[in-house]
Image (cartoon, rainbow, N blue to C red):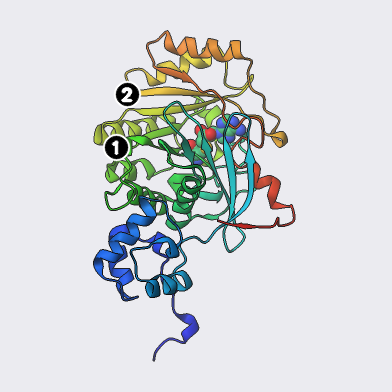
Amino acid sequence: MSAARGDAAPAPRLLDLHPRAWPERLAAYGAQPFQGRNAARWVFRRGVLQWAQMTDLPASLRARLEQEQPLVSAVLDQRSEAGDGAVKVLLRYPDGARAEAVGMPGTRGRTLCISTQVGCPVRCVFCASGLDGLERNLSQGEILEQVLWLRREQGDFHRLVVMGMGEAGHNLDAVLGALDCLIDTEGSDLAPRRITLSTVGPRGALQRIAAWGRPVTLALSVHSADDALRHRLVPGVRTRALEETLLEADQVFARCGREYTIEYVLLKDVNDSLPQARALALRLRGRRCHVNLIPYNPVQELGYDRPVPAVQEAFAEALRATGLPVTLRRSLGGSQNAACGQLRRRQISAPPSSAEPC
Ligand code: SAH
């Protein structure tokens, strides 16, 4: 017996498919294989998100696809601009879920920062993203929409960092699928070395990233060399020993050949002392990594502070003295709702704003 009409699974959206699968998918609409490839090029290379603008496709095909396969599902819910040129957008998907994405100026062009989940299950005690836990995963297409949306609004970009809301390690199918689309020559042809993937390293995630094998930069959020303190700051890692996670990160280096980054958020009087810097240096000795110190961006609800610059510098110097490469991150987007998840939190309980189509 055939399934009732309403039971049929909806056809996947095009952005949920790899661009190499577009020709076959678009054949169902009568497109020739070369037209399917051209459509992917319009989207991934030129950032065009409206079928009507793909002038080398037949008008009848464009009209049908505009109706039946809209490329973008999200609308712009809110936009927030910081004095330093960082622009944060809050996108709202059809089910009402909201995700943040940010474009920031950098020395060699813009950096885009995208989210992987709505909310976050890891609940780092200093982070706004996980305050209400996880709402849901974002799909591959929803992750790609953030990149394409920012690119259309802000022009081309130099780097992509997967460091917005959510824990990529808990949504790797969608995250790696989206990155594959961006990296592929039939997609955006983005060099993997321009991509940074940030994670706390949940069980199984780093092995999966190593097996994936693309030479993106892995950023491992550590925040303390002491397991007890790390488990308190990053509850989502449960009882996992940092050493176990670092050994897996070493495997990612062995497989992908790119040094990884250790992310360490500096929290005043919590993890910013010189003995804590020395303990971190000891833990990282001999490893192929560099340390990115992130002075804390205060989140109103959370009661943590940023150490003064002299303490930040002293921490950095204590690491450098052992030969570790260290950067002390200058804070971008600092003035307004800057830290991950803040814009969404402001909006969750607010009445819906007039939505601009993306
Ligand atoms: N789940 C991923 C991505 C999180 S956001 C991860 O944990 O790596 C990227 C980085 O920003 C993480 O290192 C995270 O700990 C840090 N971060 C979160 N909130 C912050 C804040 N308020 N100030 C500074 N860094 C923050």
Q: Residue 26, image x and y in percent? A: 33, 70
The relative height of residue 278 versus residue 27 in the rendered view (above or below) is above
Q: Residues within 10 Å of mark 1 (few under 14, many from 20)?
A: many
Q: Is residue 36 above or below residue 272?
A: below
Give the residue at x 50% y 15%.
277
Q: Tally the marks.
A: 2
Q: Which residue is mark 1?
A: 215
Picture coordinates of residue 240, whole percent (x, y): 45, 37
Instruction: Find residue 346 and name its label.
Output: none
Q: Which residue matches tag 2? A: 288
Direction from residue 166 to residue 297 in the image, left or right: right
Q: Compare residues 325 and 18 and report the one nearer the observer.
A: 18
Residue type at the position of mark 2: Arg
Amino acid residing under circle 1: Pro
SS class, disc 2: loop
Q: Earlier in the sequence, mark 2 or mark 1?
A: 1
- If the image is split into quadrants, where does the C terminus sit? bottom right
Q: Please tell me whether mark 1 sits on a helix, a strand or a loop.
A: loop
Q: Are marks 2 and 1 in contact (CB under 8 Å)?
A: no
Residue 232 visible in the shown view = no
Image vertical order of residue 245 relative to residue 212, above or below: above
Q: Nearer the viewer, residue 319 or 236?
A: 319
The span from disc 2 to disc 1 (Cα, nearest Å) is 14 Å
The spot of residue 334 in percent (x, y) is 62, 29
- The answer to whether residue 61 shows anywhere in this view is yes
